[in-house]
Amino acid sequence: MTTPLSDLEMQLVALKQEAQQAIATTTTLEDLEQLRIKYLGKKGSLSQVLGGMGRLDASERPRIGASANEVKEIIQAELDQKKATLQSAQIEAKLISEALDVTMPGVFYPQGRAHPLTSTIERALDVFVGLGYTVAEGPEMETDYYNFEALNTPADHPARDMQDTFYLSDGNLLRTHTSSVQIRYMENNEPPIRVAAPGRVYRRDTVDATHSAVFHQIEILAVDEGLTFTDLRGTIKIFLEAMFGDLPIRFRPSFFPFTEPSAEVDVQWRGRWLEVLGCGMVDPNVLKSVGYDPEIYTGFAAGFGVERFAMVLHQMDDIRRLYNSDLRFLRQF
């Protein structure tokens, strides 16, 4: 059975008209690509029409082939023209959407400021880094060994009563000072060392205008051959002058289980003596716990509460202002 010649010609004409109408009404490049596949693809409409050529007489096939090529060229030309139009419109829309009017006023974003605790920590660390100290950090959840035992504070030591500790159900605790960072650092580094350890610490304490259960400390440690209390005093004097200016300072005897001798340091601030930090020479037992020979090496340590320094430097009346995130307070800085 042969396919009438006029039927194929009519199918080609109908295919051309259908394709032209579809191409003219499409609005996106994605849809246009689907039309190309639909009409000119390997399994498209044109290929299906040409599949009927096999039923034509051999003398009629060249005529239908020429008509099919003409339809294909027309549809392809329509596709190319529409593609160029859509691409041009897409570029134009993008240019319009991304246009920048340089005459318009800019959007103002207020400049941020460092929190007073952050600025105090950075100011203090700048001083110690300038003196050759390395900044070290450690975990806030600690073991009893690093927080107490390695610092010459065994389980029955009365000094544990000085620091009411938050113990966790797994036997660990929230560190009560950043001295634990010093132990960890000494375990992994050989003398000489000079390290400053900033961080958050925790103690069971009644919150009031001058106390908080969570606060920040910075502690320093230096270990080398021949270090003396004079070196400690000189370091602290330089640090306090950088923080408060050239003010009278005094050292008072005190007690800490990890230093011997120990002292507390006061500065004469606005006409009265103000306690600002504790310090001392590293106890030989602490050096032994990390494998240092106390017959060869000596060291000194000191530590202070960042909140107290911030309150003094900025004349704050209540430590809780540092944690309330009150913008009326923070904008002052």
Image: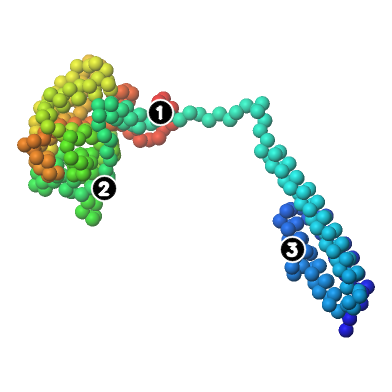
* Residue linked to disc 1: 329
Q: Quadrant of the N terminus?
A: bottom right
**SS under mark 1:** helix
Looking at the picture, tell me which residue is in the foreground, 115 or 40: 40
Looking at the picture, tell me which residue is in the foreground, 106 or 65: 65
Residue drawn at x 23%, y 47% is 142
Q: Disc 1 or disc 3, which is closer to the eye?
A: 3
Cα gap from disc 2 to disc 1, whole angstroms: 31 Å
Q: Amino acid at mark 3?
A: Ile
The first of marks 2 and 1 along the sequence is 2
Colouring convention used in this rendered image of the protein: rainbow
**SS under mark 2:** strand
* Residue linked to disc 3: 37
Query: Position of 297 compared to 42: left or right?
Result: left
* Residue linked to disc 2: 141
Q: Quadrant of the C terminus?
A: top left
Q: Is residue 176 above or below residue 55?
A: above
Cα gap from disc 2 to disc 3, whole angstroms: 64 Å
Q: Position of residue 324 (x, y in %)?
A: 38, 35
Q: Residues within 10 Å of mark 3 (few under 14, many from 20)?
A: few
The first of marks 2 and 3 along the sequence is 3
Q: Amino acid at mark 1?
A: Phe
Q: Position of residue 166 (x, y in %)?
A: 23, 46
Looking at the picture, tell me which residue is in the foreground, 216 or 186: 186
Residue drawn at x 81%, y 51% is 81
